[in-house]
């Protein structure tokens, strides 16, 4: 007898049923609240923009047109941005995760000399940052302006993630393991790569997701540090498409380009949102199972 | 014990090493151009400006479609003529303000900011702390073109002169006389004919026409989907200012500005009885369904969509041009609605506070070791024929010269939109095109001509004389304005929208006026009045 059949035969009181109904009802409302905006973007991306403004698009797409997508796929800028974003995310995440894990592991070891001082220095930066201008000056003087490293190196390590990872190492890698490994003549570095990292898949997955999402969605650093449009990440290009500059009196003699620009941007707005979210939507299910577990383990016993 | 010591030394060593590394990071390159004046052989007049090539570093915003300015034909020609090479740092326009502020804050200065985008506050602050240099002496010595313009238009000079008497920046001007009246009313002529109605001349007649549009199904689709009137609430054009004007005081509601000038006095229109009466009246139109109920929330894209619905649905709209709203196919259905007679039988048309002058076209920084050369270079741009090319595009791309040396528009290649093409060939920035240049130097764009004709025919004869000019305020005044004004604007905008759609202006009026006074409206208007008095004295 399967579990499901068992379930059906257990007597359920009336209260239980009412309770279930209310629950289902509430959860359904929440699901709609979350899913509908996403659904709307999907149907809006293939509808005629004028129909959207008339408020006629709410359940089914109207006057279906794929012109928006055609334009997106023909637009070299968007693809260039896509490529850049993928590179920044990939390289950036590798840098982030390796540095974070190494720092976190070292700090999780009780025999690290000056551990508390280093931890304090790390923590200090969480509460007091240099601010935009000093940071900019540092980046500029290191000669990183207008290179991809400006988006990767200044944000190479997030202290919060170091703490989460450190806590994870402290709680889930028993000291005896290290002693046993040392016995067999294993060095610290080897122990870290061969034993600790393989045992820490959940936390690695979490770090990858945190950092990758961060890189994928960030645009402000690119706005500040990059002048060359060929280096722009996708988010910055999107921002330029979606945030229409207010028409100014200077545009008064520039009429047809304004009208044309508006129509095009209306047309591709929604499609672009979809195109931009797809990579993360694909990535998410793969790491989601670690995600919940990892954060819990990392955060709970701190 | 011994081991601990070792550890300590190694830790100290490590820390010491890393600091040393950090300190020996690459030193910054000095961005200002160092040129030996002797070698460059600077000519005070005539061309070339220097005998041997000199390079200057400029920062400038650029439009999305524009190429890097080093690739622009117009600058190549300038370089040939002057022997001055410009090294451009082009910053895409949408991130320009942030980056400009960063450059200024970090002291990472170019020789000059071209099309600088400096706000009045920037000019005052950086002018007084020496980041950008005063230019009046340089203009006097090295800028004959600009001086001539200042003689022809004293107000241009006044406009760039800061309250402390210095000139920190150079002007930009395009005197087409188009921006004073951006609220042209259009009405659906086809529907008027279909319903056998006359072109309305008074508010009552207009009301009856809109009512007929609303109720008699002029587009013949059997649905009541017609919109009587729509406009851009608080917009820079197509706003409600002249509708309110029918009650005696044309308003300037762009971004809840509401400053109008009568006989040299600044009046805050949104606390005047005429305004109250007007809003109460138009609320009734909203109730009757004559005014688009979405009018206070729509953005321009939504407004344009209403003009292009499958069955025509716009009876009447306000905009500064008609094709943009209704599209090229329907343009012929709409006619200009001549200004209506107001309540007292007078026709009154407002004048917007938009200005055709700008004062942020060019600034020279303290890092510049060749200010004379820079001034002579930029003065080249103020030669009328050059100005036209900087603004609209160069000879050979946009213009050709006719036998009198006038610049006339070339035929554009098929399928090229003027506006987009201009972005690719015309950098904009420091230029001055005066009204008289349109007959002698450059031909006006056909579209601009069309609009001028409409304005001349219908609006110009009835326009009020005064508006609030672009005044250069002092630091203290700006400080106060920036503290008081944003809150007031937000509040008034919200109230106007609420009263227009939901009504209630009569009941709430006194509280509203009292609250504005609490917010510091009187103080704000005093500052504006002081500024205006100063401005008029100097003229």
Image: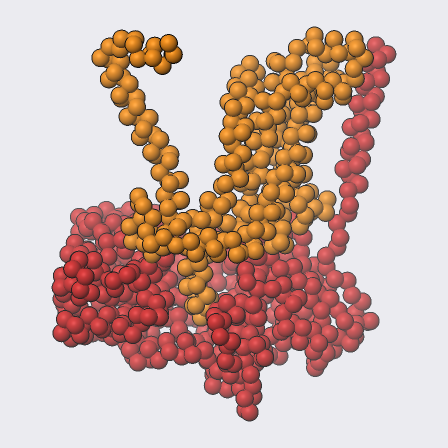
Chain colours: A orange, B red
Q: Residue shown at 51%/83% (left/top)?
A: B408
In this rendering, is residue B167 above or below A2? below
- Above or below, A300 against B298 in this view is above
Q: Residue at 61% across / 25% down in the picture?
A: A204
Residue ranking furthest to the front: A1
Q: How many marks are shown on the rendered structure?
A: 0
Q: Residue B477 at x, y = what percent?
A: 46, 55
Q: Is residue A66 above or below residue B38?
A: above
Give the x, y percent position of residue B10: 82, 22
Asked whether the viewer can see residue B107, the reply is yes
Q: Nearer the viewer, residue B52 or A291?
A: A291
- Looking at the rendering, which quadrant does residue B285 occupy? bottom left
Q: Nearer the viewer, residue B535 or B197?
A: B197
Does residue B157 appear in the picture of this structure? no
Q: Which quadrant of the view contains residue A109?
A: top right
In the displayed structure, B58 sits above or below A88; it is below
Please name whichever residue, B85 or A58, is drawn nearer the observer in this view of the structure. Answer: A58
Where the C terminus of chain B falls, by quadrant?
bottom left
Q: Left or right of B223: which side holds B429? A: right
Q: Quick one: quadrant of the N terminus of chain B?
A: top right
| Residue farthest to the right, as pictured | B2
Give percent across and percent down for residue A218.
55, 41
The image quadrant that residue B194 belongs to is: bottom left
Q: Residue at x 79, y 36 (%)?
A: B21
Q: Residue at x 66, y 38 (%)?
A: A91
Residue B286 is situated, as x and y percent measured from the top left of the image, at: 19, 56
Q: Is residue B146 left or right of residue A48?
A: right
Is A248 or A82 nearer to us in this picture?
A82
């Amino acid at each position: 007898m399967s579990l499901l059949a068992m379930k059906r035969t257990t007597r359920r009181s009336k209260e239980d049923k009412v309770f279930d109904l209310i629950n289902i009802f509430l959860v359904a409302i929440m699901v709609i609240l979350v899913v509908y905006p996403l659904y709307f973007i999907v149907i809006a991306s293939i509808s005629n923009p004028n129909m959207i403004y008339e408020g006629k698009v709410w359940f089914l797409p109207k006057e279906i047109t794929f012109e928006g997508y055609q334009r997106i796929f023909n637009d070299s800028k968007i693809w260039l941005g896509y490529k850049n974003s993928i590179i920044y995310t990939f390289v950036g995440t590798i840098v982030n995760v390796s540095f974070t894990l190494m720092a976190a592991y070292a700090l999780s070891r009780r025999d690290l000399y000056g551990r508390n001082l280093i931890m304090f220095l790390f923590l200090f930066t969480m509460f007091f940052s240099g601010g935009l201008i000093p940071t900019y000056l540092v980046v500029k003087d290191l000669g990183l302006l207008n290179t991809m490293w400006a988006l990767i190196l200044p944000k190479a390590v997030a202290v919060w993630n170091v703490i989460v990872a450190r806590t994870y190492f402290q709680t889930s890698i028993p000291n005896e393991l290290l002693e046993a490994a040392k016995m067999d003549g294993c060095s610290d570095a080897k122990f870290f790569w061969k034993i600790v990292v393989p045992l820490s898949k959940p936390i690695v997955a979490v770090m990858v997701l945190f950092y990758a999402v961060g890189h994928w969605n960030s645009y402000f650093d690119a706005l500040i540090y990059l002048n060359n449009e060929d280096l722009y990440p996708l988010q910055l290009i999107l921002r330029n498409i979606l945030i229409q500059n207010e028409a100014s009196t200077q545009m008064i003699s520039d009429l047809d380009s304004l009208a044309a620009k508006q129509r095009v941007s209306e047309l591709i707005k929604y499609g672009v949102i979809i195109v931009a979210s797809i990579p993360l939507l694909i990535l998410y299910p793969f790491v989601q199972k670690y995600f919940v577990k990892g954060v819990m383990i990392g955060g709970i016993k701190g | 014990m011994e081991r601990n010591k070792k550890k300590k030394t190694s830790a100290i060593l490590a820390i010491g090493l890393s600091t040393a590394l950090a300190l020996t990071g690459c030193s910054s390159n000095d961005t200002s151009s160092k040129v030996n004046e002797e070698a460059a052989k600077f000519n005070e007049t005539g061309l070339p400006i220097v005998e041997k090539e000199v390079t200057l570093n400029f920062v400038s915003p650029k439009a999305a479609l524009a190429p890097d300015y080093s690739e622009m034909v117009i600058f190549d020609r300038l370089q040939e003529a002057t022997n001055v090479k410009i090294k451009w740092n082009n910053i895409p326009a949408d991130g320009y303000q942030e980056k400009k502020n960063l450059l200024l804050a970090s002291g990472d200065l170019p020789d000059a900011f071209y099309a600088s985008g400096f706000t009045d506050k920037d000019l005052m602050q950086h002018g007084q702390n020496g980041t950008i240099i005063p230019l009046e002496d340089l203009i006097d010595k090295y800028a004959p073109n600009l001086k001539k313009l200042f003689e022809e238009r004293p107000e241009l000079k006044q406009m760039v002169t800061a309250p402390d008497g210095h000139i920190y920046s150079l002007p930009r001007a395009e005197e087409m006389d188009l921006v004073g009246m951006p609220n042209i009313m259009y009405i659906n002529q086809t529907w008027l004919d279909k319903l056998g109605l006359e072109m309305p001349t008074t508010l009552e007649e207009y009301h009856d026409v809109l009512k007929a549009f609303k109720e008699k199904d002029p587009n013949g689709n059997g649905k009541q989907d017609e919109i009587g009137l729509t406009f851009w609430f608080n917009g820079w054009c197509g706003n409600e200012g002249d509708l309110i004007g029918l009650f005696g005081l044309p308003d300037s509601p762009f971004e809840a500005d509401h400053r109008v000038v009568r006989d040299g006095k600044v009046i805050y229109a949104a606390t005047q009885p005429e305004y109250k009466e007007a809003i109460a009246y138009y609320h009734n139109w909203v109730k009757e369904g004559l005014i688009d109920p979405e009018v206070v929330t729509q953005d321009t894209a939504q407004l344009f969509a209403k003009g292009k619905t499958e069955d025509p649905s716009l009876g009447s709209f306000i905009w500064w041009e008609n094709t943009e709203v209704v599209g090229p196919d329907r343009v012929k259905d709409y006619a200009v609605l001549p200004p209506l007679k107001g309540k007292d039988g007078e026709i009154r048309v407002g004048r917007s506070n938009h200005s055709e002058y700008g004062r942020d076209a060019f600034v020279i920084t303290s890092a510049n070791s060749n200010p004379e050369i820079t001034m002579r270079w930029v003065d080249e741009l103020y030669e009328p024929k050059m100005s036209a090319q900087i603004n609209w595009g160069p000879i050979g791309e946009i213009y050709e010269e006719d036998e009198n040396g006038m610049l006339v528009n070339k035929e554009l290649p098929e399928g090229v939109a003027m506006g987009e093409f201009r972005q690719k060939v015309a950098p904009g920035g420091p230029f001055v095109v005066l009204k008289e240049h349109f007959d002698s130097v450059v031909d006006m764009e056909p579209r601009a001509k069309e609009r001028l004709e409409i304005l001349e025919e219908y609006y110009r004869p009835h326009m009020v004389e005064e508006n609030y000019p672009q005044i250069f305020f002092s630091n203290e005044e700006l400080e106060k304005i920036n503290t008081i004004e944003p809150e007031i604007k937000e509040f008034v905008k919200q109230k106007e929208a609420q009263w227009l759609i939901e009504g209630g202006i009569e009941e709430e009026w006194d509280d509203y006026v009292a609250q504005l006074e609490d917010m510091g409206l009187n103080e704000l208007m005093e500052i504006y009045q002081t500024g205006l008095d100063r401005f008029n004295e100097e003229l």
